Amino acid sequence: MDSKDSIAAGKNRDSVPRAAILDTWAQDAWNNGIQIDRMEDMQKIAVQTANSLYEIIIIGGHEGDILVRGGKFFPELTPAHLAGATMGGCFCKMRGIYVGFRMEFSANGQRIITSPVETIAVLAPEDDKEIRGSHW
């Protein structure tokens, strides 16, 4: 067995993080999150990361166009582009938001990567005031 096989088999776990192995991404069921490109425009989402609560409004899900508020980079609703779910490296689940992964945005000429997502809530219109009132 060569070194590539031993890494994939998990024998050198300290050498290469599991998320860095392409097979990990290909075999994931992707059932612990959402794809904004499969949701309606103007849908509102609340995403709690390890450090911040984000309010996201989908403007054009197929393109990744959103409005986002939360964290230190988005104190007010800001037009942004959601690239998708990442572990902070080169792999990205395009237009996705998944528990355990980080969200990757681009806005105002900057690339912003959040802390890991802990919870995702798709909001009904009546939930919007309650979420915003308690956190903003």
Image (spheres, rainbow, N blue to C red):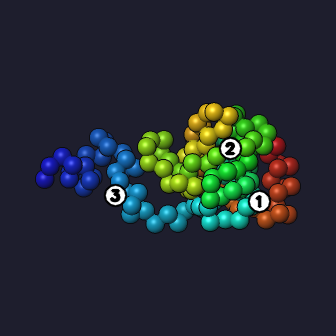
Which residue is rendered at x = 69% and y = 56% of the image? 60
Q: Amino acid at mark 1?
A: Met
Q: CA distance from mark 1 to mark 2?
A: 14 Å
Q: Is residue 50 visible?
A: no
- Residue 115 x, y percent position in the rendering: 58, 41
- Which residue in the protein does label 1 denote? 42
Q: Which residue is mark 3?
A: 23
Pointer 1 local density, CA inside 10 Å: few below 14, some 14–19, many at least 20: some
Q: For the residues carrying marks 3 and 1, which lies nearer the camera in this image? A: 1
**Nearer to us in this view, 76 or 79:** 79
Q: Residue at x 39, y 61 (%)?
A: 26
Residue 25 point in image, percent of width and height: 41, 57
**In the rendered image, the vertical position of residue 45 relative to residue 20, given as above or below:** below
Residue on which the image places disc 2: 80
Say which of 129 and 65 sits in front.
65
Residue 32 position in % (x across, y down): 55, 62
Please tell me which of labels 3 and 1 falls first in the chain.
3
Q: Secondary structure at mark 1?
A: loop
